[in-house]
Image (cartoon, grey):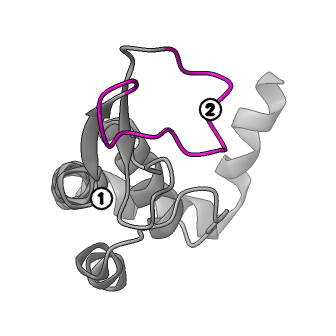
Amino acid sequence: VSRMFKLPRHFHASKVLSETARKVWRQILGMLALLSFLTVLFAILLYEVERGKRCYVGDKGCEPPASIADYVHTGDMILVDKKGNASSFANVFYGLWFCFVTLTTTGYGDVTPSTNVGQVMAIFL
């Protein structure tokens, strides 16, 4: 394993890469900080836009969606999106997951925005 770390010394390209990284580490760190800040900001905004309406199971007009009906009990708070389904963005961390997956262009499709505003935000993300 230690030989693997000594190997780059023998290649000119790795020397150029390490020297460049040493010279511009502040700029790289600044860009990563900005990217992290914008990711968290978009996650919070997406959560606020996509969380849906809050209702308590058992209250008048609050019927749990069929996908979660077996898991909720009377008095539990649920978030219902505009289509009547359980919200994909139950908390900010789901928004953070969506932003991370979108930025890395993986796009699993497990969390998707359902509102028009959320879909437009995802385009700009």
In this picture, which residue range is highlighted in magenta? 57-73
Q: Amino acid at mark 2?
A: Ala
Q: Residue furthest front?
A: 60
**Residue in view at x 61 percent, y 68 percent:** 107
Quadrant location, the N terminus:
top right
Q: Which residue is mark 1?
A: 50
Dot 1: element: helix
Compared to residue 112, the image places residue 67 above or below, namely above
In the depicted view, which residue is nearer to us: 11 or 60? 60
Q: Position of residue 7 (x, y in %)?
A: 76, 45
Q: Which residue is mark 2?
A: 69
Compared to residue 66, the image places residue 58 above or below, namely above
Separation of marks 1 and 2 at Cα, in angstroms: 21 Å
Q: Position of residue 51 (x, y in %)?
A: 29, 50
Please report whichever mark, 1 or 2, sits nearer to the chain's N-terminal start. Answer: 1
In the depicted view, which residue is nearer to us: 78 or 50? 78
**Residue in view at x 29 percent, y 72 percent:** 118
Q: Of helix, strand and loop, which mostly describes the magenta segment?
A: loop
- Residue mark closest to the camera, 1 vs 2: 2
The crowding category of the residue bearing disc 1, from other C-alpha atoms within 10 Å (few below 14, some 14 to 19, many at least 20), is: many
The crowding category of the residue bearing disc 2, from other C-alpha atoms within 10 Å (few below 14, some 14 to 19, many at least 20), is: few
- Asked whether, in this view, residue 124 is left or right of residue 63, the answer is left
Q: Position of residue 58 (x, y in %)?
A: 39, 24
Q: Position of residue 60 (x, y in %)?
A: 29, 35
Whether the magenta-drawn stretch holds residue 87 is answered as no
